[in-house]
Amino acid sequence: MSNLEAFRKVWPQRQATANIESEEDMKRYIVIELKDELTHPRVRKTKQQKLELAVERINDSNLDQQEKQQLIEEYKKIADQLD
């Protein structure tokens, strides 16, 4: 399974995931998520907090271990690029 398919399985209820059609779209959405751009500025969480929440959700999902690891690595790679 690709990271994109795994991403959609972890967040099936999010309206935005329906519009994500490629790996690049997914990466852009992860950046938005990690920067917490869809939240009002006064209540935004830090990038580290958002990463921890994403990792927790991925680990709690029903993906297999390899899929979880690949998606977590993608999140961490993108988070590192935001520094």
Image: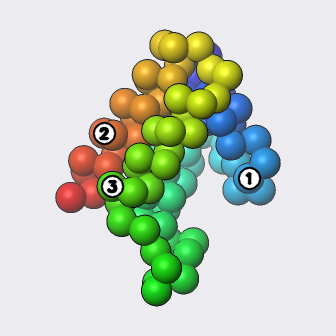
- Numbered circle sitting on residue 80: none
At x 74%, y 53%, the residue is: 14
Which class describes the residues within 10 Å of circle 1: few (<14), some (14-19), or many (20+)? few
- The CA span between labels 2 and 1 is 22 Å
What amino acid is found at the position of numbered circle 2 in the picture? Lys
Q: Closer to the observer: label 3 or label 2?
A: 3
Which class describes the residues within 10 Å of circle 2: few (<14), some (14-19), or many (20+)? few
What amino acid is found at the position of numbered circle 1 in the picture? Arg
Q: Residue 77: x percent and y percent?
A: 31, 39
- Numbered circle sitting on residue 77: 2
Q: Closer to the observer: label 1 or label 3?
A: 3
Q: Secondary structure at mark 3?
A: helix
On screen, residue 14 above or below 9: below
Frontmost residue, 26 versus 80: 80
Q: Is residue 4 left or right of residue 8?
A: left
Residue hosting label 1: 14
What amino acid is found at the position of numbered circle 3 in the picture? Gln
Q: Residue 32: x percent and y percent?
A: 49, 62
On screen, residue 30 above or below 63: below
Q: Earlier in the sequence, mark 1 or mark 3?
A: 1
Q: Residue 63: x percent and y percent?
A: 62, 20
Residue hosting label 3: 48
Q: Is residue 2 left or right of residue 12?
A: left
Q: Earlier in the sequence, mark 3 or mark 2?
A: 3
At x 48%, y 67%, the residue is: 36
Q: Earlier in the sequence, mark 2 or mark 1?
A: 1
Q: Secondary structure at mark 1?
A: loop
